[in-house]
Amino acid sequence: MCINCMLCYAACPEYGLIPKYIGPAAIALAHRYNEDSRDGGREQRQQEIAATEGVWDCSFVGACSEVCPEHVDPAGAIQQVKIKSTVDWYTQHLMPWLKK
């Protein structure tokens, strides 16, 4: 549903402070593809968006979702990616036998 207006980037304080931050629209789009069962690139994509300049740089101000004219809710997507990233980490370190 994103129309690439980039208002979320303009509203994001982290994007202004951290030059390498991926940003809300890119993370929300990656999350959308990660949730698609037909897509096979989740592991590679998840590594990239869960990296240092990815979701963990978001301080959850929520301004990106407030300014979105299409109500995409990139802030919500970022929080969901944080949860998935945490589950991935625990699965990898505490239950390595489940690794694919």
Image: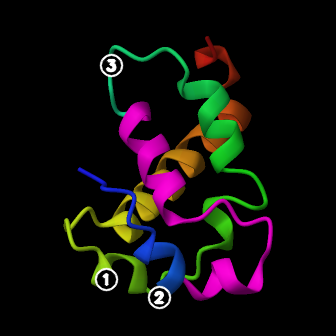
Rendered location of residue 19, percent (x, y): 80, 73
Asked if 54 appears above or below 48 in the picture, the reply is below
| Amino acid, disc 3 | Ser
Q: Nearer the viewer, residue 87 or 42?
A: 42
Q: Residue at x 75, y 86 (%)?
A: 17
Q: Nearer the viewer, residue 22 or 54?
A: 22
Q: Secondary structure at mark 2?
A: loop
Residue picked out by circle 2: 61
Rendered location of residue 42, percent (x, y): 53, 27
Q: Secondary structure at mark 1?
A: helix
Residue 33 magenta-drawn? yes
Q: Are marks 1 and 2 in contact (CB under 8 Å)?
A: no
Residue 96 magenta-drawn? no
| Mark 2: few/some/many CA within 10 Å (<14, 14-19, 20+) | few
Rendered location of residue 44, percent (x, y): 66, 27
Q: Are marks 1 and 3 in contact (CB under 8 Å)?
A: no
Read off the magenta span: 12-34
Q: Residue at x 49, y 46 (%)?
A: 84
Q: Are marks 2 and 3 in contact (CB under 8 Å)?
A: no
Residue picked out by circle 1: 67
Asked if 90 appears above or below 19 in the picture, the reply is above
| Amino acid, disc 2 | Val
Q: Work out whether mark 2 precedes mark 3 in sequence or the reverse, and give the earlier one.
A: 3
Q: Work out whether mark 1 precedes mark 2 in sequence or the reverse, and give the earlier one.
A: 2
Residue picked out by circle 3: 37
